[in-house]
Structure formats: structure tokens, C-alpha cells
Amino acid sequence: MVKTVSELNAIRDITKAKMSGYEKQILICGGTGCTSSGSLKLYEKLKEEVAFYGLQDKVAVIKTGCFGLCALGPIMITQPDGCFYSNLKFENIPRIIKEHIVEGNPVKELLYNETVTPDGSIKKYDETAFYSSQERVVLKNCGVIAPDDIEQYIARDGYQALAKVLTSMTPEEVIKELEISGLKGRGGAGFPTYLKWTFTRNAKGDQKYACCNADEGDPGAFMNRSVLEGDPHSVLEAMTIAGWVIGANQGYIYVRAEYPIAVEHLNIAIDQARKLGLLGKNIMGSGFDFDIELRLGAGAFVCGEETALMRSIEGKRGEPRVRPPFPANKGLFEKPTLLNNVETYSVIPQILIKGGEWYAQYGPDGAHGTKVFALGGKINHTGLAEIPMGTTLRTVVEKIGGGIPNGKKFKAAQVGGPSGGCIPASLIDTPIEYSSLKAVGSIVGSGGLIIMDEDSCMVDIAKFFLEFTIDESCGKCTACRIGMKRLWEILDRITKGNGELEDIERLQELAAHVQGSSLCALGQTAPNPVLSTLRYFKDEYIAHIVDKKCPAGVCKDLLTYSIDQEKCIGCGRCEKNCPADAISRTDYIAPGHKLASMVIDTKKCVKCGACITNCKFGAVSKQ
């Protein structure tokens, strides 16, 4: 049990000495992405090989959280040399241990190619374009420590902020540091954190609660999941501090059940913190009691809204309610409640150790700090990227993201998840921060960032995101329940070639009604993809409506597949792979060819694209 700061420091110093005693550390990613690619088997094989050479006392094998560059998993980093192994296979492990760990010669052909220079020298992983443009604050411990080992967290100054708060700060001083830092809620609303803590502290109530929103539901978003998988104690420490500041003795983490690794690591972390006396009764001898419990969500996107989340914790249907009263005055179980999301909580211990001014050095006025984004879509480096606020979209796409695959052109980025807006290529130098994104019709949101290339149809994209929010609407508001369905029907009509020019005005008018009449942020922001694509890609809507063409070649009802008989050599691959038997052989043999060419029966064609995929001679095209 840790009862004093001295005892906490003793654990820190002993663990630091233990870790520094290893000549090498092998860090293997145990996050969801790499685990799905078999990294746990690699982890066991690494330990087996290290034991085979009798190196257990010299080489530490650590299963960590996410490194960020998910496209290259399974990933492994060796320290202190910083070698970065990517796309590892089980059979690679014995060779790496023998040649690199035992003999001191990194296996270059298994290293991430950007770390091997033309002259054959090896760069450290953090010198690559993906990592060098980032500032890892939230992700400080992810990929560095074993998340299921509280002592490794303590060795990196874990729980020092809690000790500092309990022994030498007042609640007002904590709130002041948060104000100086400029930290805003990272769940999407961007509300100043210090104000939310102040309101809850000042609220009257015999019982208060501190809650964490870990119900991350945006398509393609996995920022919070990765923090919980790789650094769960940062959230527990921050929640305990929050409980002390606002006067709460009970905390709840609402996490979706689809995050099994995050749930497992949270349960382990809570149990470890209780055993050390960092959760529970009389924490560090201060007289302050605080405990945390998990509540599993069933995957309802609307439960990311604060009042719906609290109703779900109570065991009720997850529906938003009218505000005011706000949760700070009347929240969980009708008591004053503080709610922040995972990313917001995770940086608070560092802010309190290093000071609010340290955090405020990142980002412009009104948007201090860093933000974690989940990069997905048509981008080479899918994964997690943490950037200082104000970093341009160009830096994210071209440098961190590594550009667009297959030589395609960047077309747009959907920032802020399904509730965000599409930013066109012409605005690629837009700074990623609250005011700049709002000016171009988008939002920071929780951190989803989907990249689209020239083959993306923006009408179809708007339809896709709207379909998601329709499915996730709780149905309480008429404007949201019915209005969004009508919006989708108009878009569906346009993508099938049955649209009218008047539909553009109908979309804009209906979107305004949905925004202005919906109860919660789901409905209020759901039309954003429609409005932003209309704003920047109106010509695509017109092409669908007037020309009955999809410029990107995505909308099937507007496509026609054909075979250029002069290019076709008659190999028959397209015919063999056509699921609709829509391709047959003609009597025509093009000059220079030996076999008769093929032809597509457009009445039978289901427009699956298999013919284009299987043609090696560029004879098949779509219009």
C-alpha cells in the first residue's frame, strides 16, 4: 500500500533502476490492430527465444499499447537503438533474436523501409516522417510501457500528479492550472475543461460523480480505445484528481463492450490501483476516498451524448434529454456529475506536473494543446497521429499520412467523423483547430479523419455518413428521425440518376431544419457532410442530376461498362470471372491478335467491376 509520497517515489526509483538494468528492451505492440494480425503469438515467441539464449536478465520483452502506425502491424521496436520492425511474421522472430539481439546486426530487410537509408544506415523510428511531425503527449506512454504493469506507469512519473494534488494543492489551484493550459474537451464539443470542473465543484449536492466517456462510436475512430489499451492508468489518475476537486467519491467509466482489450486493461489497472491504495479508501493517507467502476455500453452511437450516456449507466434507454439542467447540476442519478472523455482526462496528470503554461505552448490561442486523430481511408499510413493544434491538413496528409496510394490525387478529407464536414483539396493548407475548421464548414470532433482520393464520389460519401447517423439515431426527435431519412432518400434518388435540380435546394432547406430542431448534437450535426459536399462539390451533384453521370465512377446506376475491341486480346479472363454471365465472345478479331474479342451485355451487367479488375490489358472501361 502506498501511503506517502516517499513510498510512491520508492516504487518509481526501484522500477526505473530495474528497467535501466536491461541492455535491450523489445517492445511489441499488443493493441487491437496488431493483435488481430497475430502479435500475441509473436510476443510469446520473443520470450521463448530470449529464454533460449539465456538473456532474460539482459533483455526485457514488453507487450505495449499501440505505436500508431497501424498500417504496418505487427510492429516491434527495439531500444535503445530505436530499430523499427514492421509487418512481422512468426517465422521472423528467431532470426531477429539471433542476428540483432545476440549478434548485434539488425535485420535490415525486415525493418520499416523508411528507416533504412540508401547508403544502408539505419534511422531510429522517431526520425521517420510519420513520427517526426507529431508531438506525443496523450500518447506519451502508448507503445512505451506495459499497460498491465502499474509500476512501469509509476516509473514514468505516474500518480505523481495525484500525490502533488493531495499534498500541496487546493481544488482552486488545480482548476487554475487547467485554465492556464487552455485544455478543451476532446470529445467533440471543445468546451473549456476548467469551466466544466468549476461548475461541477460549485454545484450543490450530497453526492457527486466523476465519469469518463469512452463510448467511441465514430466510424474509423480508435483514439480513445488506444489510450485505454496502452495507458489506462493516466485516465484513472486524472479521474481520481477530478473526484477530489469536485467533491466526488465515485467514478464511472462508460466503455463500449466492443473494446475487449481496453476493458481487460482497465479492469487490471483498477485492481492494481486499489491494491496499492491509489484507489479506494483514504488514498495516500489523505482521508480522501474515491473508487471507479466500469459500465459497458452496447455500441449505441447516441450514448456518446452526455445525458444519453448517463441514462445508460443508470440502466435506462440511452436517449438524450433536454438541457438545462446540465449534468454539472443534475446528471447521473440526478446528482451533480462531471463528464470528460478519455483523451481529455489522459493529459491532465502531465498538465499538473509540468504546469498549464507547458501545455499551452502547443497550438494557437483558443486551441491549445495537441489532438489525436485516427487516419483512415485512401492514405498510405493509416493509424494514430497526435499533432499540435494548428498543424495543417497538408502536413497530416502528405507527411504524416505518407500521401495517397497508387499515385492518386488527394480529393477531400472528412474531419470530425460522421458529424464533420468534407474539406476539399483546394483547402489542404487549412490549420486543424476549432475556428479554422468551423470557417470551412467542418469540426475537430472527437478525431476521426477520413481521406478520400479522386475515385471517391462526394454525393455517395454524404449518403454513407448520413446512413450511419440514421441507423444510430435514438428516434426521439421528429426532425432527426424523419428529417434525416428524407435527406437520405433525396441523396439516394440523385445517386440513381433520378434527381432534380430542385433537390439541391431541398437538401439545403431540410438540412437547416434538422440542425435547428434536433435535441442533441447527433441530429444537430448530422447534415454537415451533406452541406459541406454541396458547398465544395456542387458540380458533382449537378453531374449526377443533369448529365446522369458519376464523375468518380462509383454510383452503379450511372455506370456503363464496355470493352475496347481493339485492345481486347480475347483471353477470356473477364468472361470467366463475370458473376452475371454478361460477357461473351464476338466474331471480331482485332489486328495483331489471334482470338476474337469480348463484349459486355449491358442488360445483364450488374456493374460489379470484376471485368476491370481481371483485365490485364486495359481493354475494359467504365463511363
Image (cartoon, rainbow, N blue to C red):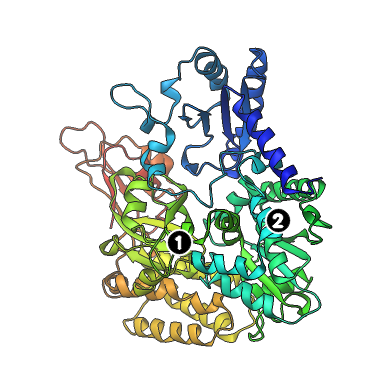
The residue beneath circle 2 is 257
3D distance between C-alphas at marks 2 and 1: 35 Å
Q: State which quarter of the image contains the C terminus.
A: bottom left
Residue 180, relative to residue 499: is it above or below?
A: above
Three-letter code for the amino acid on which mark 2 is drawn: Ala
Residue that sits furthest to the right in the current view? 281
Label 2: how many residues lie within 10 Å, few (<14), some (14-19) or many (20+)?
A: some
* Residue under the image location 45 percent in, 24 percent down: 110
Residue in the image at 64% along x and 75% along y: 474
Identify the secondary structure beneath mark 1: helix
> What residue lies at 29% left-to-right and 66% top-to-bottom?
549
Give the percent coordinates (x, y) of residue 44.
67, 26
The x, y position of residue 177, in whole percent, is: 55, 65
* Residue 616, quarter of the rendered image: top left
At 40% from the left edge and 65% from the top edge, which residue is drawn? Answer: 433
From the viewer's side, name the closer residue of 234 and 245.
245
Where residue 190 appears, as percent x and y from the top left, is: 51, 70
Query: 305 or 432: nearer the eye?
Result: 432
